[in-house]
Amino acid sequence: MATTAETELTFTSREHPSPATPEDRAAILANPGFGTNFSDHMVSIDWTEGQGWHTAVIGPREPLSIDPACAVLHYAQEIFEGLKAYRQADGGIAFFRPEANAERFNMSARRLAMPDLPEEVFVESVKRLVDADRAWFPTVEGGSLYLRPFMFASETFLGVRPAKQYKYLVIASPAGNYFKSGAPAVSIWVSADYIRAAPGGTGAAKCGGNYAASLVPQAEAIERGHDQVVFLDAVERKWVEELGGMNLYFVFEDGTLLTPPLTGTILPGITRDSLLTLARDEGLAVREERYSIDQWREDANSGRLVECFACGTAAVVTPVGQVASRDGEFTIGSGGPGQLTEKLKSRLVSIQRGEVADPHGWVTKLGD
Ligand SMILES: *Cc1c(COP(=O)(O)O)cnc(C)c1O
């Protein structure tokens, strides 16, 4: 890769003057939950028009001071990533495909008219944070350190145009155990009144605005007694797309798999992509094809569809047992976790944790 001013960024380190006490940290790490507790440090890098990326700091996690006219607060020019650092079988720490997150971050940046962050800076930033906060690994079996890189328009300006100043930050949150197998199946609600993404919109970008738009339909799902919402395409309101934050897979009785294609309205999940490869490694046929809600119901009722699961970094693989819409409910297979779902999940988790060989070079060790 070309040497640019950006790739020569040097990080300044500042230790936290008053990190969490070992007792407080131990209490959090024994029961970390998700997204409510954070490590002591954070990464911060600034971008200014004309100057590019500068002032890279790994320092204490602390509140930001921003002007009330800060552009992101008004026009939502913001993107993020989500990845985990995993404790390895050999005691080390590793990341799973962090360069894929770096690449997707830049894809999102381009869609939101934001500057690219060199991929090696992205990867270095997450490595530095995990290195500084090694003490924040959950002690519970299967725990991980969830990393949240994000970028927002930090310019003080109310005009509508791409900002001339941005902040890139990374924070870390200890995450609890997601079961390696036997995760309970979820029930999902098919949104009829709302869509997540339209052709030409921001569906393929990981931006906060997509999530803001999904909160009402997600709340509707919860209100009706379901766990998650599933969105249909915006044009025909017919093709199954994805959940608010997870991609979908369908497993048929002949052993084939199907996942909706990346047409621009679906977020290109790294878990989705990894499972595509792992399934093909197993000799399974995987089709990336559109699948309609009517076909889904028919196949579940006829028994042709035997399993269905959602996938994403946070929970890896979540079986879908029930689907409900205004036209009624249907159950997939036994309504519980299916065999192939469990097998693929276990395969992926074993690679992430360094318990088996890594044939695709997906694992990056902290020291690498
Ligand atoms: C992040 C995300 C996913 C899952 O992506 P992974 O890279 O597998 O974590 C799926 N759908 C949406 C809308 C997302 O934001």
Image: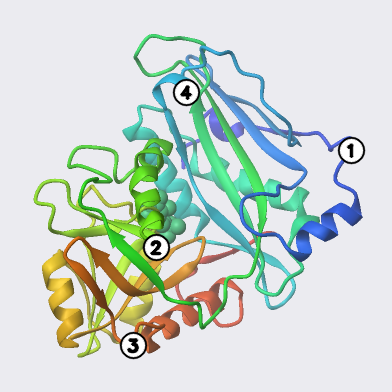
Q: Earlier in the sequence, mark 4 or mark 3?
A: 4
Mark linked to residue 225: 2
Ligand 1 placement by image quarter: bottom left
Q: CA distance from mark 3 to mark 1?
A: 52 Å
Q: Disc 3 designates what residue?
A: 334
Marks 3, 1: nearer the viewer: 3
| Residue beneath the point at 36% across and 65% down | 272
Marks 2, 1: nearer the viewer: 2
Q: Amino acid under label 4?
A: Val
Q: Amino acid under label 2?
A: Gly
Q: Amino acid under label 1?
A: Ser
Q: Disc 1 designates what residue?
A: 18
Estimate the x, y position of residue 20 in percent, counting from the top left: 85, 46
In front of the other: 151 or 10: 151
Q: CA distance from mark 1 to mark 4?
A: 30 Å
Inspect this view and state whether residue 291 appears. no
Q: CA distance from mark 4 to mark 2?
A: 34 Å
Q: Earlier in the sequence, mark 1 or mark 4?
A: 1
Q: Disc 4 designates what residue?
A: 72
Estimate the x, y position of residue 25 in percent, counting from the top left: 83, 54
Q: CA distance from mark 2 to mark 1?
A: 43 Å
Q: Is residue 71 above or below residue 248?
A: above
Q: Name the side, left or right, on which 61 lies relative to 98.
A: right
Residues tagged 4 and 3 counted as in contact (Cβ below 8 A)? no
How is the protein colored in the picture?
rainbow
Q: Earlier in the sequence, mark 4 or mark 2?
A: 4
Marks 4, 3: nearer the viewer: 3
Q: Amino acid under label 3?
A: Ser
